[in-house]
């Protein structure tokens, strides 16, 4: 069919591009043209990444794309970029070119680590009970963590606006990884180590996105819910209060919501409201059990949350009500935040 023919044509063009890039590589090596050697390596890297990420039908090959083949191409792409750095020798040779190669290397390493996580036993379930039965060997864990940590380190060394954003994204991916594997450790020391790593990476990602909410609203709210969930899995009032704080900190994300992310933000608003209510209910129970004679702080906050919920239930779902809905949530989160102080 047409799609298959297009895939075949794409593969032929990709093979042709790879061939000529390799021909150029030989010529620039003879001429010792370090900058163009590095640029050609970047182009060869892109050829490998296209093969890893698409289902083009290679001439004489199968249309199936098993993960092992995709990983092979990603490793080949990483090899080209490492060779590009070797060609340049040091950053002072050509700082702009070096940094471009570095950014591409960091990106490819992160893709490799995330793919490995998704294709490991960790990617098979998000159910915490089923996760308990999963065993991830230290070697498997290293294969996932190592490229992601390398990626994070490279991005942080670049210190550009884009690299800072990508470093936060890498920290977020590492946080998601450690938030899963801390529960499947076989001894207390390892459990504490992995839990600490999860909180550390979440903290780095959280600080960045909290300071750069505009344009990253959905990412920040989802990250906040993930961090709140991690705090909630650790028992005690202090952790529940921190989980609540994560949810309340999303307030600014619901201020003047961009129409392009409206549908996502409606769903996230429901998630935040639901999580806040559940956390407050848990804190009310702990407050009641403690009977410390303090003012019922969380009980009062829970009443405000219930009031918001009842008001929302009376409102319709018309599009023109969404702005009022976000405004009410913004006000509620601000009010609850002031009551926690």
Image (cartoon, rainbow, N blue to C red):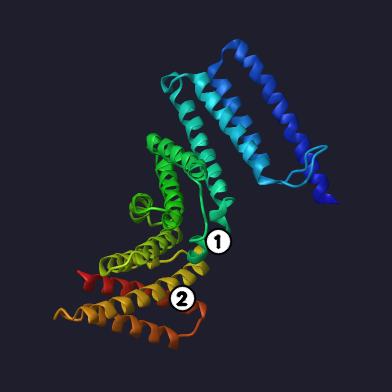
**Which quadrant is the C terminus positioned in?**
bottom left
In the depicted view, which residue is nearer to us: 66 or 328? 66
Name the residue rendered at 38%, 62% in the picture: 230
Residue under pointer 2 = 322
Residue 186 rendering spot, x and y as whole percentages? 42, 53
Residue under pointer 1 = 125
Residue 146 rendering spot, x and y as whole percentages? 47, 39
Helix, strand or loop at disc 1?
Answer: loop
Say whether residue 53 is left or right of residue 4. left
Can residue 328 be seen from the camera position used here? no
Name the residue rendered at 54%, 17% in the picture: 34
Name the residue rendered at 64%, 37% in the picture: 72
Q: As drawn, which residue projects farthest toward the front?
A: 187
In the rendered view, would you say 88 is above or below 169? above
User: Which comes before the other along the chain, label 1 or label 2?
Assistant: 1
Helix, strand or loop at disc 2?
Answer: helix
């Amino acid at each position: 069919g047409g799609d298959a023919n297009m895939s075949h044509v794409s593969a032929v063009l990709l093979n042709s591009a790879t061939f000529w890039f390799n021909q150029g590589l030989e010529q620039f090596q003879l001429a010792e043209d370090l900058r163009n050697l590095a640029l050609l390596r970047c182009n060869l890297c892109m050829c490998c990444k296209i093969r890893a990420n698409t289902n083009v039908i290679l001439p004489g090959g199968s249309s199936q794309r098993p993960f092992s083949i995709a990983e092979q191409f990603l490793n080949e792409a990483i090899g080209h970029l490492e060779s590009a750095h070797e060609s340049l020798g040091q950053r002072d040779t050509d700082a702009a070119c070096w940094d471009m190669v570095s950014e591409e290397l960091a990106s490819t390493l992160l893709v490799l680590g995330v793919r490995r996580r998704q294709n490991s036993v960790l990617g098979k379930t998000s159910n915490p009970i089923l996760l308990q039965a999963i065993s991830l060997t230290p070697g498997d864990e290293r294969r996932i963590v190592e490229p992601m940590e390398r990626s994070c380190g490279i991005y942080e060394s670049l210190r550009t606006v884009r690299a800072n954003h990508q470093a936060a994204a890498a920290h977020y991916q590492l946080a998601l990884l450690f938030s899963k594997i801390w529960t499947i450790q076989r001894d207390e020391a390892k459990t504490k180590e992995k839990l600490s790593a999860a909180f550390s990476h979440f903290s780095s990602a959280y600080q960045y996105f909290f300071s750069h909410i505009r344009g990253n609203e959905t990412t920040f709210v989802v990250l906040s819910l993930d961090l709140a969930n991690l705090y909630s899995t650790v028992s005690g009032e202090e952790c529940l209060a921190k989980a609540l704080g994560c949810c309340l900190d999303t307030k600014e994300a619901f201020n003047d919501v961009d129409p392009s992310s409206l549908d996502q933000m409606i769903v996230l608003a429901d998630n935040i409201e639901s999580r806040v209510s559940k956390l407050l209910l848990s804190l009310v129970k702990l407050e009641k059990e403690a009977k410390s004679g303090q003012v019922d702080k969380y009980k009062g906050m829970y009443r405000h949350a219930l009031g918001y919920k009842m008001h929302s239930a009376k409102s319709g779902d018309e599009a023109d009500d969404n702005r009022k809905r976000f405004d009410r949530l913004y006000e509620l989160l601000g009010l609850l935040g002031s009551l926690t102080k």
